[in-house]
Amino acid sequence: MLRSFLMTLVLGVAALPVAADDSSVALDREVQDLKKEVLALNRELFLLEEELLYPANSQVALFVSMDIGDFFSLDSVQIKINGREVANYLYSEKEAEALIRGGVHRIHIENLKAGEHEVVAFFTGTGPQGRDYKRGAELRFEKGLGAKYMELKISDRQSKLQPEFIISEWE
Amino acid sequence: MFRRALAISCLLFAAGGTLAEVGEPVTVRDPHYGDVLFHFYKGDYFESLVRLTAAQEKSRVDNHAEEAELLKGGLALSYGLHEEAGEIFDALLASTTKPEIRDRTWFFMAKIRYQRGYLDEAGQALAAIGGELPKELEPERRLLHAQILIQQERFDEAIALLDGWKGPKGWSDYARYNLGVALVRGGRFADGAALLERVGRLSDDRDEMLGLKDKANVALGFTWLKNEQPERARPILQRVRLNGPFSTKALLGVGWADSDKGDYRSALTPWTELQARNVLDAAVQESLLAVPYALGKLNATRQAAAEYESAILTFSREQQRLEAAIADIDSGRMLERLLDAPEQSDASGWYWQLNALPDSTEGRYLYLLMASHQFQEGLKNYRDTLALRENLQNWKSSIVVFESILETRAEGYATRLPQIEQSLEAADIGEIRERHAAMQARLNDIESRRDVIALANRNERRAAEELALVKQNPVLQYSTPEIEDARNRIRLMEGVLRWSADRDFPARVWRQRKALQDIGRVIVAAERARFAVDDARINEPAALNEFDARIRNLEPRINEKLIALEQSLDRQRGYLHGLAKQELRQQYERLDTYTVQARFALAAVYDRATAASNANGASEDTQ
């Protein structure tokens, strides 16, 4: 008798889907509905926040992107706009990995008046041969009407076996 | 331990782990799509979904329209929104013409259908995949196919599908294990045993694979025991690590293998080792009965009786603890402790798993419960609902800030607009622009006539004026050698002056043009400011009203949802407490059964002892 119980226990550990009972199905549906509704609310709130705080006419957003990452492992990015420090972001391992896989990080968003501005970025991390590496890049740009998106791009320069850091306006 | 126990189901249930693998090199053409991917790859599905739907609403991901829709479906699936994911995939299949998008969509449809238990439909979705999936998805496609076949009891097809396959991260071995167990359950011992044997002999030292090996060996060992072949069971059970999570079951099995062969003395070795272990373990509880059983068989009656009495006492103490644990669950603290337990994964949705159990009264008893898919899913839902509540509570605070920002902006508008209008009206930009145009025309005229004196500097102009005055002197009309000399000197000075002005003329024209351009830019900026003020005058009141309306609309909806979340949390707590108590009661009842068995066995031991004593007494009397 004892052994038959344990037999069931041992052979029952295969992790196959378990039929759910009515109450768990109802609760699961309830949670799905709540998630859906809260997501919709979040979308509206996200847009409200952005439009209220960063109207399209004055909005400038900076995005960090990275490709391959063979020659550079990113630790942090510091950004100055018109000499004023606006962002100093430390990347976790997961975030750096997300960048290499094609993710683009919106590191900073703010309002700027129409006219000429300067952005300077410093990239800190580990470069070729595992050495500490810090490089800067800068760009003067004209802010007109409409939102402006800038790309802070880290890429591998195969010909020189070095990383390359470029700031450009996102076309 | 719980992470591994559920590993195989999670491979198939959690789209997140594999959806992330869809990450073929992507050329991001819209920055906001890249931003969505960034949060997605971080495992933050909720944030990723919010940003994606917002970006879609604002047409910011138009260059990735179909990929974005596919990603949205995958994200919804990862976040546990199966119905929404299904709707998205259905719509995508109806609209897309790209074969690679169709194939990936069919794959995710298959996963959803499998999760809902629609095995035939899931198989049909897999069959609809026409080409190759991205290489990261292929192993999961095969694993999913194998799982479907196993559950449909199409074992031969499953065996053929897994034959010779080496999936990533030991997936194929998990599938073989599941197939082996399914075959054994279905009565095909030889086939099942062959697969379990293969998994049980894996040469892979990773922790998770060692765990899988142990599990396969325990399953196989017990299969042989069930088939009354203890001599085959023993060496297999002995492969199980002595310190692993499956060691107690293996020790119990080794004991049974020995006892089945009639070698009760050998059986006592693993069973006695088990007795010293944690009494919460079902195998340990069973050893408490197995040891006196073996002692009884060895005619050690007195020791057997003592062991049965000790087991009854242990079971009784355990039941008292269970009663206390059930009372503790009733107090409502269980879930809080579970969620506060260390080493929790920070992923959301279906990928989240409980890694460790809290050290609490009832926590000690919940091992079996935690291994159940139903409880884990319920707990995930509870945790996600808590996160939703926190999210809305944060927005509730933000809304107050938005109201304040809007108020400040409205005040600023009301105060500053008249001042700005006044200063802009004081400067007649139209008149300034006309003057600028006149200056521009004059410079053009000077340049075309090469009027070098018109651009002469102050000294040159003074010199030119003085020379003009000198030339008007009547004396110069006389003709004397001295006056002739003076006229020559005046001509010479005029020549020098003109030569000098002529030399600098191009540079002076350039400087003038630049100055006029600068003025032009200032005029443009002033006109832009004028335009902005006009625009603000027309649009700002409407924009302020629109923001105000949006805030007023959102605020009550947030409050309403917070109440709904609170009510749902109550219901979920009730459900999870119910499941936990049900599990503890089952454990309690099992101990009841063990206690009854122990009492019967004890009575039998006493009976046998009494009978033996009587027989001895009768024999002495006869003598």
Image (spheres, coloured by chain):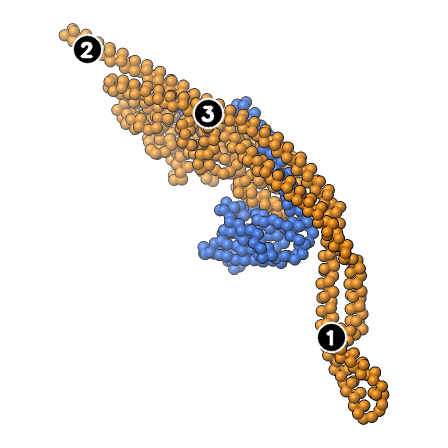
Chain colours: A blue, B orange
**Residue B458's disc number:** 1
B175 left or right, relative to B132:
left
B260 left or right, relative to B89:
left
Q: Earlier in the sequence, mark 1 or mark 2?
A: 1
Identify the residue at the far top of this view: B622
In depth, the one of B189 and B505 nearer the eye is B505
Image coordinates of residue A5 in percent, x first then y, are 39, 21
B275 left or right, relative to B499:
left
Q: Is residue B135 above or below residue B314?
A: below
Q: Amino acid at mark 3?
A: Ser
The chain under label 2 reads: B
> Callout 2: helix, strand or loop?
helix
> Callout 3: helix, strand or loop?
loop
In depth, the one of B505 and B197 nearer the eye is B505
Q: Which residue is mark 2?
A: B616
Q: Which residue is found at the position 82% from the left and 83% from the top? A: B471
Q: Which residue is mark 3?
A: B331
CA distance for labels 3 and 2 = 58 Å
Identify the residue at the far left of this view: B623
Q: Earlier in the sequence, mark 1 or mark 3?
A: 3
Image quarter where the C terminus of chain B lies is: top left
> Callout 1: helix, strand or loop?
helix
